[in-house]
Amino acid sequence: MVKKLISSEVLSASGVQFGTSGARGLVNQFTPDVCAAFTHAFVVSMRRNFTFTQMAVAIDNRPSSPIMAQAVIQALTDAGVKAVYYGVVPTPALAFTAMQDNMPCIMVTGSHIPFDRNGIKFYRPDGEITKADEQAILTQSVDFNAINTLPDLTVDCRATELYRARYTDLFDAGLLVGKRIGIYEHSSAGRDIYQGIFESLGAEVISLERTNEFVPIDTEAVAESDKEKARLWSKQYDLDFIFSTDGDGDRPLVADENGEWLRGDILGLLCSKALKIDALAVPVSCNTIIASSPEFKSVSKTRIGSPYVIAEFSELAKTYKRVAGFEANGGYLLGSDVSVNGKYLQALPTRDAVLPALMLLSLAKTSSIKSLVGQLPQRFTHSDRIQNFAPEKSLSILESGRNNIQQLLNSLGLSELNVISIDNTDGLRLELSNRAIIHLRPSGNAPELRCYVEANTQDEAITLVELVLHKALMA
């Protein structure tokens, strides 16, 4: 006899929660039945507003991802939906292709979070799900069959082909002639696509450090070992540019001619200038020079997470034609159709890693990347996190700080400073009397406390992040 389950009960008992980008949890929490519960609830919630007979599925390179995809595909079959499986591809490649085919999609990925965790991202036919969609998925009470068998996986290459063509068709074939580009491949979901894109535009590509071990690259908290690698690679191979991404290929990590990694919001700023964007939506954690840039007619500040950035697009589109957004982690979201080099580029309102990299390289045709960054107003940011830090402890630190700001400053070793302004948009963001900004926030994807700092020098930003996190750890 087939065991019947109810989606809301399975999800409530699973321990899996939605973070800033999809459902996230420990690998052992994503049992086949939990994956099926998410899938059935998603199908029912989508059928209320969309008509479809197919749904696309893809994965990252985590060892746990194929089994989760098999459970998702079996659940789709049980729900009467044909699954189209694109294999290991970047999240934006899956999302873009599903949008062309007017169908929802599911990405099995934990992005940058640690190896023992994984996740699922959901997309409507018109882009990322909203926070309201998340609640609908969690509260659906759908009866479904428990997963007893897992189907074989057969890969369709359409997403790979469409994503590559999106960018190779946008630029002249000689855009990158004479450029030597290193691709730090590690275990990125897009590592089999990127070389072809850069080579088709004329670059000489050097593959760097591909591995079969999953590497949880966090583009907001780049490891010191990765910083040193980039500098060494740049000298060893005489590179003009280094390109990498996080695990699912929606956040870029790029380095200049000296192997210095760019901050994601600086990359987004330069990309937006190259695209001649009118209005931007960016999280409150981004560098303040963005809002003061004269090139943009409007800059809206949001909570951290792509759903909040995307939610702002509809409001900006009422007034402005060229709308986009990006995050401090580098992920770029194109909120409207635009013209680039006289060619049409369709909106892709989900984080993407390739577009900002190529737009930066197009800007650097007549100038070095280092000089482009150097021409910007000199405000510097840095961020890091404490991993395996209980969310309850993070929230306690923030709450005590809101109740007594001076006591929080004293506990962080900053008693000589005063608070000029407080921003509670997402976490606790403090502007201090020395013009530094300290932003504390629990991660929405993992048990981590994140600290973002903006200061007058890079050394000051780094020192403040290290000090604040050390004091928080000791608290």
Image (cartoon, grey):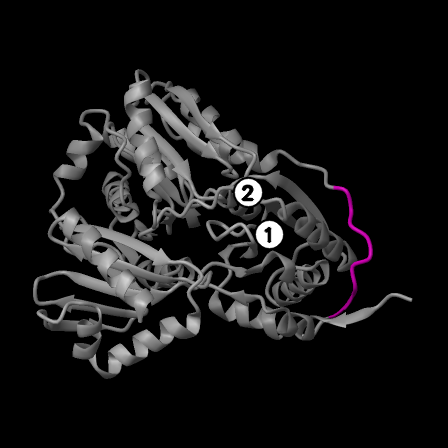
Q: In which quarter of the image is the N terminus?
A: bottom right
Place residue 172 in its image quadrant: top left
Q: Residue at x 21, y 54 (%)?
A: 287
Question: Which contiguous range is marked in magenta?
Answer: 143-152
Residue tagged by mark 2? 97
Extreme residue in the bottom direction: 403
Which secondary structure is most common in the magenta stretch?
Answer: loop
Label 2: element kind? helix
Residue 311 located within the stretch drawn in magenta: no
Q: Is residue 24 above or below residue 186?
A: below
Q: Which amino acid does label 1 sit on?
A: Cys
Residue tagged by mark 1? 105
Q: What residue type is labelled 2?
A: Thr
- Please state the total of marks drawn on the protein image: 2
Q: Which residue is drawn at 10% across and 61% down?
A: 435
Q: Residue at x 33, y 64 (%)?
A: 315
Label 1: element kind? strand
Extreme residue in the top direction: 178
Residue 390 location, x and y as percent?
44, 69
Q: Is residue 356 visible?
A: no
Q: Which residue occupies the foreground of this view, 93 or 467? A: 467
